[in-house]
Image (cartoon, grey):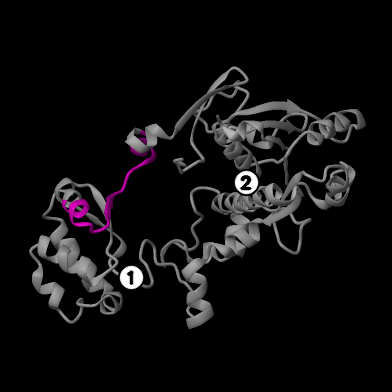
Amino acid sequence: MNLWNDLKVVDLSSVLAGPSVATFLAELGAHVTRFEKPGGDVTRGWKLPSEDSTQPVSAYYASVNYGKELHTADLRDPEQRATVLKVIAKADILIQNFKTKDLERFELLPDALRECFPRLIHCHLKGFLNDPQRVAFDVVLQAETGWLSMNGTPESGPVKMPVAMIDVLAAHQLKEALLAALYLRERDGKGAFIEASLEEAGIAALANQGSNYLMAKHIAQRMGMQHPNIAPYGDTFICKDGQQVVLAVGSDAQFRKLCLFLNAAKAADDELFATNANRVKNRPALIQLLSHHLAEVDSDELLKWCHREQVPAGAIRNIKEVSESAAGQAMTLESEMEGQLTKRFSSKGFTIHR
């Protein structure tokens, strides 16, 4: 029996972060009812040139709206709003990303909902922590939370992450808060009002780059694939067969093993490279050395050895190759959406064994 089947979710959110949280709950088994404004979510029209313009949904939209019962409702209309509120009355979770003025206009202010529906877990996603009325799109948040300043190379200038990374991070923050609120409700029977922001999610994910500044006053610079603290880590090389690979050598012991495999044992004892700190300082010479030796090895041979010896390394795959991998195939979900076959990768990257 799937215990999530009894969970009822109302999704009023738009674009990516909020809808992806509702999709995650649908994948767990919850019943998700989604209401969109007349004309549908804006992402329905975000189509690639190769997509059929006559189809009702885009691949972008399909990626975060799996497993939902889809409806249209104009919340400005009292009758339609009353219909939506009746569904919310029976729900466990409400997800929305409206501006404050719209929450008031649509009768969705948190205090009012708490009074009417005390067990409801009401999730509100906003863009900026202290400026909730400001329009927030991912690339703007990537700019203002530090990501564009450190992504790319010295020559490239700022480079956006190739997915809406801040939206994805905010969705994870909302999932974590939501699951915590569900746990608390099991203990005391009370719902909650949850707020998450794209701005907070972007800053929370700065991780070691944030602490590098807070503790060492190091402002992260654009380094391409390279890591400010570890070498060779994120550095890419072309093997004998033309395959591009990436190394993530995190310890001196791993580096020594790699040098022995590459018939470059002297490098492991060279003062320039013997310790991680020195490898970071002397990265250009290190990359030149490894590039020379890795160009003499086929990628299959290298990667089989690395996997066996637990030296982190990987082939650089494109999305087609990822989709054809065992994990990619296992995580591909298909569904019919308004008469259209849609596909996406699962948003659930875990398995619970009981």
Residue tagged by mark 1?
Answer: 230
Residue at x 77% of width, y 43% of height: 120
Amino acid found under the numbered disc labelled 2: Ala
Q: Is mark 1 on a helix, strand or loop?
A: loop
Q: Residue 26 carries which label?
A: none
Given residues 23 and 220, the one toward you in this image is 23
Looking at the image, residue 6 lies above or below residue 307: above
Given residues 74 and 293, the one toward you in this image is 74
Rendered location of residue 19, percent (x, y): 64, 40
In the picture provided, is 337 more to the left or to the right than 194? left
Q: Does the magenta stretch include residue 232?
A: no
The quadrant holding residue 143 is bottom right
Rendered location of residue 78, percent (x, y): 92, 32
Q: Which of marks 2 and 1 is nearer the N terminus?
A: 2
Amino acid found under the numbered disc labelled 1: Ile
In the picture provided, is 284 more to the left or to the right than 241? right
Q: In which quarter of the image is the N terminus?
A: top right
Q: What stretch is highlighted in magenta?
A: 305-323
The quadrant holding residue 55 is top right
Q: Residue 17 carries which label?
A: 2
